[in-house]
Amino acid sequence: MNSNSGGPSKSKAGSLQPSETSFKRKRGVFQKELQHMMYGFGDDPNPLPESVALVEDIIVEYVTDLVHKAQDTGSKRGKLSVEDFLYLIRKDMPKLNRCTELLSMNEELKQARKVFESDEEKLRKVFEADEES
């Protein structure tokens, strides 16, 4: 009798998450940012590396799960949109409010960059015209 048939391979296949099978992520990519965020929320200025790694794992798992759910929602239309994410977090009003606030702020920043770039281009043209004179 083969002791490996069914048992271990079955539990292995059942325990693998799509993110674990499709790619291997680098750990510690968000270490500095998370340390700052943890400190901002009341942790030590230099939190334990294990704590940072745990928070990173939790966040990556949450975001990965959210993206997969958004893909399922958006697959009916064939594309993923911001509204798919907003739909998923609609039950958590503070999160939804914060997301819409951040999206609005992002839009304002885009507009400000456009104005700045166009002003910069106008100044460059004026400066070049002055040099030619």
Image (cartoon, rainbow, N blue to C red):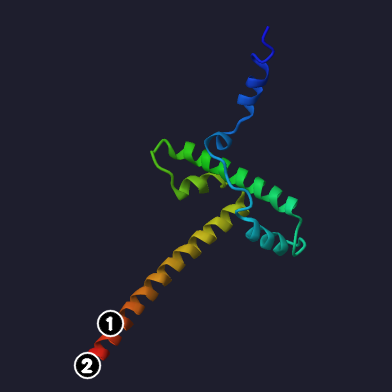
Of all residues, the one furthest to the front in this rendering is 2
Q: Secondary structure at mark 1?
A: helix
On screen, residue 123 versus residue 109, left or right, reads: left
Q: Residues within 10 Å of mark 2 (few under 14, many from 20)?
A: few
Of all residues, the one furthest to the top in this rendering is 1
Amino acid type, mark 1: Lys
- Say which quadrant the C terminus sits in: bottom left
Residue 66, quarter of the rendered image: top right
Amino acid type, mark 2: Ser
Q: Is residue 9 above or below residue 43?
A: above
**The one of 61 and 3 positioned closer to us in this rendering:** 3
Label placed on residue 115 = none
**The one of 109 and 94 positioned closer to us in this rendering:** 109
Comes first in the chain, label 2 or label 1: 1
- Say which quadrant the N terminus sits in: top right
| Labels 2, 1: front one | 2
Label placed on residue 133 = 2
Q: Secondary structure at mark 2?
A: loop
- Residue drawn at the location 53% of the way across and 39% of the way down: 23
Q: Position of residue 104 (x, y in %)?
A: 49, 62
Of all residues, the one furthest to the left in this rendering is 133
Of all residues, the one furthest to the bottom in this rendering is 133
Q: Position of residue 71 (x, y in %)?
A: 47, 39
- Residue drawn at the location 52% of the way across and 43% of the way down: 67
- What residue is pinned by disc 1? 125
Distance from the alpha carbon under mark 2 to that under mark 1: 12 Å
Mark yes or no: residue 63 visible: yes
Q: Residues within 10 Å of mark 1 (few under 14, many from 20)?
A: few
Q: Kindly check if marks 2 and 1 are in contact, taking CB atoms under 8 A apart as contact.
A: no
Q: Position of residue 44 (x, y in %)?
A: 77, 62
Mark yes or no: residue 91 visible: no
Q: How many marks?
A: 2
